[in-house]
Amino acid sequence: MASTFTDLGLELMATGENAGTWGTKTNANLSLIEQLTGGVLQVSIAGGAGTTALTIADGALTGTAQQRIIELTGSISGNRIVTFPLLTETFYIIKNGTAGSHTVQLKAASGSGATVTFATGDKGYKLIYLDGVATNTGLFEAPLGEANEVTLTGTETLTNKTLTSPVIGTKIADTNGNELLLLTATGSAVNEFTLANASTGNGPTLSATGETNVGINIKPKGTGEVVIGTGGAAATLTSSGANDLTLDTNSGTNSGVISIVDGAGGNITITPNGSGKIVLDGISFPNADGSVNQILTTNGSGVLSFVDNSGGTEWQAVKTANFTAAAGQGVFANTTGGAFTLTLPAGTLGDEVSFADYAGTFDTNALTIASNGSEKIVGSTANLTVSVERAANTLVFTDGTQGWLLKNK
């Protein structure tokens, strides 16, 4: 009885067959088994669009489909097809080592069974197996890893994936590969941006986080501008490069409105640096607080300063003992219980102090009006004594020569 062969080319010897050559054939079978389980073969499929057929040689080591690992080589100028013999039932590791951006399809020699294809840019490995179905052998890929596994060199789309502490290189690109965001690493960085989304009716937040007090720097390039959109016309922040910052409401012929609002109802503080002043449209504000009841006045050149309020008199509750008045105050003096002294404040030009005889007793118990320090009253360093019943008057400060003068005599 003659020998037969398996689908992979191994010789099955009949009893009593191959006398004198059995050892040689057995050794050939063992060599073929070794090749089928671990052999490596390079097969050129160079050329344009077309098909390369892999073969199985019965009882020989020359078949191109009788290796475990097959590397496809050569320069291809069109889509290529590589076929395997029907009834083949095994697995292979296939390497696409070709040059050229074209597909390489793996399939059975005939029939409509499943196929596996290397994409135009896929020059990697595929683990495939053939089911050996008669006349319609299917060829399937067994992924090297989990299904849809992310690879180091592949291009994948991640959907609903959570990245914990991801490390990104020097840029983030858009879907066209163009630079969307460039990243600069700082070796000792401790401050960063934090993005927070928001619920309905609230805006998302971009914050500077890290240390306790951290600013956010926005720096345009060259003569570029920082544009803050308003949903319509844009407001523009422009830096001249000379420590100036201009906010343009871009309102055309209409008046632009700039609002500074603390939504929580807190204070809003605008503070110049060092000894600088706040200047709005040429008007310079003082950089220190004024005194109680002072008002802002201008020098006619756009410089505002605090002065005492001479537009009205701040009358005090009735006084019955020595009292030092402040500029702008009026004093109801009641000397029924005895005479006392009203002391004037240190005067500046225009300061005023008023007095009135509350109970009509100045003729009995006089009111003494004294200056503060060395200032004069009506040109004299002596105190002023008021002894006229129901007397009332206002003193206004002039200068160091005349000091306090009576407005009404």
Image (tube, rainbow, N blue to C red):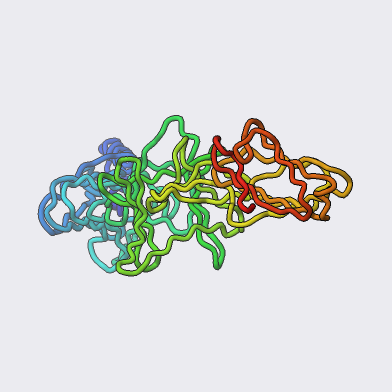
- Residue 260: percent from the left, percent from the top? 49, 57
Count how many numbered circles sit on residues in the image: 0
Q: Is residue 201 above or below residue 37?
A: below
Residue 60 position in % (x across, y down): 23, 44
Q: Quadrant of residue 365?
A: top right
> Would residue 49 be found to the left or right of residue 109 on screen?
left
Looking at the image, residue 405 lies above or below residue 380: below
Nearest the eye: 200 or 96:
200
Q: Looking at the image, can residue 158 be seen? A: yes
Task: Left or right? Give the position of 194 relative to 41.
Answer: right
377 to the left or right of 286: right
Give the percent coordinates (x, y) of residue 326: 67, 44
Q: Is residue 14 visible?
A: no
The outermost residue toward the right is: 337
Measuring from the top left, give residue 227's x and y in whole percent. 34, 56
Q: Nearer the viewer, residue 203 or 155?
A: 203
**Front position in the image: 195 or 249:** 249
Residue 21 vs residue 262: left or right? left
For image coordinates 10% across by 56% down, the residue present is 48
Residue at horizontal 63 percent and vertical 31 percent from the top: 374
